[in-house]
Image (tube, rainbow, N blue to C red):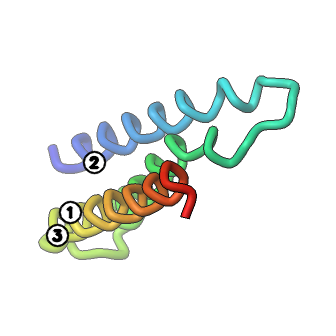
């Protein structure tokens, strides 16, 4: 049951990544870096999914690792958003 949950989680993250990335890949004109930020967040969240599914991390650290990466992604995205909004 654990593997199917991880696979489902990874599938959802992959779907969200491609759902955010694909529309911008199909645009023929030049795109700005901020168009790719939503897909980048899902790419960051895919890192722990790949690490856990590959077996590099023991199962007992799975929740902690996902939580840590999710907090780091939230912090980095908040800082990037503030930099772009307030033009620092």
> Residue 17 location, x and y as percent?
51, 38
Q: Quadrant of residue 55?
A: bottom left
Q: Are marks 2 and 1 in contact (CB under 8 Å)?
A: no
Of marks 2 and 3, which one's residue comes earlier in the chain? 2
Q: Is residue 86 above or below residue 35?
A: below
Of marks 2 and 1, which one's residue comes earlier in the chain? 2
Which residue is at a point 37% across and 75% down the rendered structure image?
56
Q: Quadrant of residue 23?
A: top right
> Residue 14 location, x and y as percent?
47, 39
- Identify the residue under disc 2: 6
Which residue is at a point 20% across and 63% down the rendered structure image?
67
Q: Is residue 26 above or below residue 72?
A: above
Q: Are marks 1 and 3 in contact (CB under 8 Å)?
A: yes
Q: Mark number for residue 67?
A: 1
Q: CA distance from mark 1 to mark 3?
A: 5 Å
Residue 11 or 42: which is nearer the viewer? Answer: 42
Which residue is at a point 16% across and 69% down the rendered structure image?
64
Mark 2: secondary structure? helix
Q: Is residue 13 above or below residue 50?
A: above
Q: Along the horizontal axis of the image, is 27 left or right of 11?
A: right
Q: Local crowd at mark 2 within 10 Å, few (<14), some, or many (≥20)?
A: some
Q: CA distance from mark 2 to mark 3?
A: 15 Å
Residue 56 or 69: which is nearer the viewer? Answer: 69
> Residue 86 location, x and y as percent?
49, 54
Q: CA distance from mark 2 to mark 1?
A: 14 Å
- Identify the residue under disc 3: 64
Q: Local crowd at mark 1 within 10 Å, few (<14), some, or many (≥20)?
A: some
Residue 18 or 52: which is nearer the viewer? Answer: 18
**Mark 2 against mark 3, which lies toward the viewer?**
3
Mark 3: secondary structure? helix
């Amino acid at each position: 049951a654990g593997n199917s949950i991880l696979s489902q989680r990874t599938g959802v993250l992959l779907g969200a990544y491609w759902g955010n990335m694909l529309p911008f890949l199909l645009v023929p004109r030049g795109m700005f870096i901020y168009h790719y930020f939503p897909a980048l967040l899902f790419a960051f969240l895919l890192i722990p999914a790949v690490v856990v599914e590959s077996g590099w991390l023991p199962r007992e650290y799975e929740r902690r690792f996902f939580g840590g990466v999710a907090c780091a992604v939230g912090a980095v995205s908040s800082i990037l958003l503030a930099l772009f909004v307030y033009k620092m």
